[in-house]
Amino acid sequence: MAANLPSSGNILRNLVVAVVAIALTVAVFFGLRTQSATPSLASLAQTATPYELAQTNDKPTLLEFYADWCTSCQAMAPEMADLRQTYGDRVNFVMLNIDNDKWLPEMLEYRVDGIPHFVYFDQGHTPIATAIGEQPRTILADNLDALIASAPLPHVQTLGRASEIPTDPLSRRAVIDDPRAHGSQVVN
C-alpha cells in the first residue's frame, strides 16, 4: 500500500513546478501588457491635424508627406509621436499620404520627390523651410522650438535617407515589394 502514496519529494517537486509555472505566466502576461506599442503611420495620420484646419488656425505647422510603404517614414514614427506629444499643443502636425491623389496639388506645390518630406510653416501659414528624408529628433525639435519662437530655423533644407517616389502613380505600389528601390538610386 505504501507504493501508491506519493513521496514527499514528489509532492515538493510538483509544488515547485506549479509555483514556477504560475509565476512565469503572470510575468509573461504583465510583460506583454506593459510593452510600449510602436505607433503606426496610420494611427499617427488618423490623429493628425487636418490640412485644412492647419491652414486656418494661428499655430505654426509641420507638414509631413509620407507613404505607408516608406521604411524611412516607418522608422521615424516613434520620434514623430514623441514630438507630437511634446509640441502638439503649440504646433500643428499634419500628415499627407502621397498615395492619395487628393494631395497631388500639394505634392507639386512643395516639390515632393522623396519621402518623408517635411514643410515648416510659420503662424501666418507661409512655408519657411523643408527637410527631406529621415531626420534626427534633435533637428526636428530644434526647428520646432524656433518655429514656436518665430525665430529663424537652425536647420534649413536638411537631407536624410529618403524613399524615391515613382513618377507613375500606378507603379508606387510595386515599390513595396522591391527592397532595392529604397535609397538605391545614385544621384549624379
Image (cartoon, grey):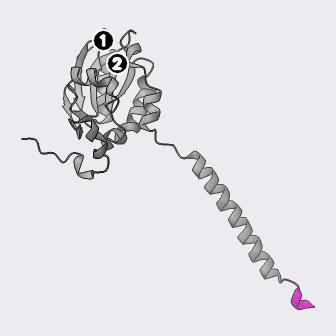
Q: Is residue 151 left or right of residue 10?
A: left
Decide: is 37 above or below 128.
below
**Residue type, mark 1 in image:** His
| Visible residue check, residue 174 | yes
Q: Evaluate if marks 2 and 1 touch, with contact meaning CB atoms under 8 Å apart.
A: yes
Residue depicted at 10% across the width and 41% down the height: 187
| Visible residue check, residue 154 | no
**Residue type, mark 2 in image:** Thr
Q: At numbered mark 1, what does the secondary structure look like: helix, strand or loop?
A: loop
| Residue 7, position as x, y percentages in the image | 83, 84
Q: Is residue 30 left or right of residue 105?
A: right
Screen quadrant of the C terminus: top left
Going from the N terminus, do you reach mark 2 or mark 1 first?
A: 2
| Residue 14, position as x, y percentages in the image | 76, 74
Residue depicted at 26% across the width and 20% down the height: 105
Mark 2–mark 1 distance (CA, rounded to whole Å): 8 Å
Residue depicted at 64% across the width and 53% down the height: 29
Q: Which mark is residue 99?
A: none
Residue denoted by label 1: 125
Screen quadrant of the N terminus: bottom right
Residue denoted by label 2: 61
| Residue 170, position as x, y percentages in the image | 28, 38
Residue closer to the observer: 41 or 6: 41
Q: Residues within 10 Å of mark 1 (few under 14, many from 20)?
A: some
Q: At numbered mark 2, what does the secondary structure look like: helix, strand or loop?
A: strand
Residue closer to the observer: 5 or 54: 54
| Residue 147, position as x, y percentages in the image | 30, 17
The residue positioned farthest toward the right in the image shown? 1
> Which quadrant of the view contains residue 13?
bottom right
Q: Residues within 10 Å of mark 2 (few under 14, many from 20)?
A: many
- Part of the protein shown in magenta: 1-6
